[in-house]
Image (cartoon, rainbow, N blue to C red):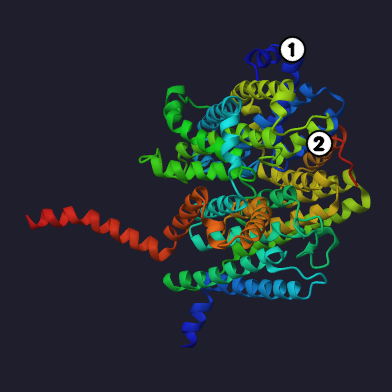
Amino acid sequence: MDGHKKKTLSNPEIQDGIVVLLLGVALLIYSLFKHYTARVQTEWKMSPYLFPVLISVFAILLAFSLFADGRRVMAPEEKKKDSGSLINFKRVVIVALMAVVYEILMNVTGYIPATVVFLMAMIRFFGEKRWWMIVVIAVATSLIIYLLFGILLNVRFP
Amino acid sequence: MSILGVLAYCVNIRFIILTFLGSLAGMFVGAIPGLSVSMATALLVSITYTWSTEDAMGTIMGVYVVGVFSGALSAILVNIPGAPSSVVTTMDGHPLAKRGKAFKALKYATVYSFIGSVFGLAALAILAKPITALALKFQPMDYFLLALFGLATVGSLTSKSFSKGLIAALIGIFFSLIGLDSVVGSPRLTFGIQGLKSGIATVPALVGLFGFAEVLCTVSDGYAEGEVTKLEKMVVKTGEVLKEFWHSLYYCVIGTFVGALPGAGGPVAAFLAYSEAKRIVKNPSVPFGEGAVEGIAASESANNACIGGALIPMLTLAIPGDAVTAIIMSVFYIHGLQPGPNFLKTSGEAFNAILAGGFLGCIFLLVLGTLLTPVVSKVISVPKKILLPVVTVLCVVGAYACNTRMFDVGLMFFFGILGYFLRTRGYSVAPITLGLVLGGMMDTNFRRAVSLASTAENPVIALFGRPITIVLTVITFITIISNIPAVKSLRVKKVRSVDLEPVKAESAI
């Protein structure tokens, strides 16, 4: 019985169904709460929360549809996560974090220094070993993009 | 509209040069991931502020026509659509490019984008009045049903599981509802976040879903050291390419008609045409989704035909068909022109300039698409260890440039990470895009329809009683029902039993 339960929960469709169900219920409660506690009461037909309620109901129905999909297909055997996919996932996290740091850095140092540093770090991270190449690409790309957006298209960079 | 008036612009050297410059800009803007036609057009509004209306129209039409086409270049070569309307092109374009036939895919995209653009603009010139008359008959409920039909079609086409396709569409609709409510004007689903009050801007969301998510997926796949799709020249006979010509005219009709309906633009047209291609092309070169040129022809002819179609409601009803036409409309206002029912009578010159700019843009599309594609592909075909960081910077700058606020960069990251996780779990991001673009329109029209029907004697008849509404309800219902797994498996069983009957009969003899 425990094994069956474990197998069911390891099914991606069932997992997704649970998430969608929870989000649908949360959106439904939030929308109903917001509608009935609004300062200015409106009829449902004009309420800003009519459509969110409809979406939440659809989401709940689709969650059950996912459960049905999950039950129809046999639960896949638990896949052992190989070290390769874990390393790649770590790389995804690192790239995402570097991008966020770049956004913060751009606010502090301005566009060009932040972009040069970010590009150098990223190109190096992706495996380019020649430093002269890294510097040339980072500086040239930053300047070309600045020329295109900042000068030609009049975008004001931070 | 007078043919001579249009021709006069077509032989005006200044007008030709400006349209060419616009087309050249459109070629790169559309092809480079992170840049979009709507963003470039928006920025052009400030540049062309001091120009004459005709010059501004020529340049903008060049960007528009060639930019919509060149979205297919990045869709084919990098699997990142330059515009939402090129999403469908990725389905067959990129698999074909992966097989080493990128040149063939690009040639199909160029030829059918040209055919689509010419068809759409010709339709704008000839059929503006009849199509406007039909579009005028649409009521709020019809717009809602049309969008719902589009989402159901997208959901069934883009994901292996229909439920997952619809969930992705719901995610898009949810995000479209964030911000100030268009009917009541109160903030909705902002959760107290100030930056969300103005809603989710489409450009950062699209850049995140298609640009940054692609970067993360590529890193996740472990191909960071690999090369992007190379463009190797190969002989592709024009006769072979034009085999889909007659079908493409049908896709062009779909594109023009869908383009003329406000809100339902290039993405819906491309998906509908693709769906029709799957139905009418019995023996594609390879199965759809694996590099079928018939799929590229359908998508590109329909989304480019939308250009002419989208201009019809904008010029005659002052209702823009898509984001770019909304921006073009602002150019009219800046120059003191009033789009609407009297536009053709009062501003014939501007209408001629739009048509001339559009047709010249089509010629430049063909020329640049044939001659410049290898150059553009070199811009894209750089090693991934260089391309990925540059694309990330373009994503950041592209998201920032639209409204020049860092909050949009944060949104772009959010949508990028969301897109990455959804894609790894088998959800397509295309329905999210469509939900995001159409959600607001669906919400407004649905509430308007319900509100109008509530005052009628019989609300159900008021909502669904009109012939157009009945047709739309039936096709939407059929699309949804036919994609429910239980109904699908019943249909498969039925087909199998029909196939087996002759075998049984033969064995009985």
- Comparing B492 with A121, the one in front is B492
- Comparing B174 with B453, the one in front is B453
In space, the residues marked 1 and 2 are separated at their CA atoms by: 24 Å
**What residue would you read off at disc 1?**
B13
| Chain ID, mark 2 | B
State the count of labels.
2
In this view, the residue farthest toward the left is: B509
Secondary structure category for the residue under label 1: helix
Position of residue B308 relative to residue B87, above or below, is above
In the rendered image, residue B97, in percent from the top left (x then y), is placed at 53, 38
Secondary structure category for the residue under label 2: helix
Q: Quadrant of residue B355?
A: top right
- Comparing A27 with B348, the one in front is B348
What is the three-letter code of the residue carrying label 1?
Ile
Mark linked to residue B43: 2
In the rendered image, residue A80, in percent from the top left (x then y), is placed at 54, 71
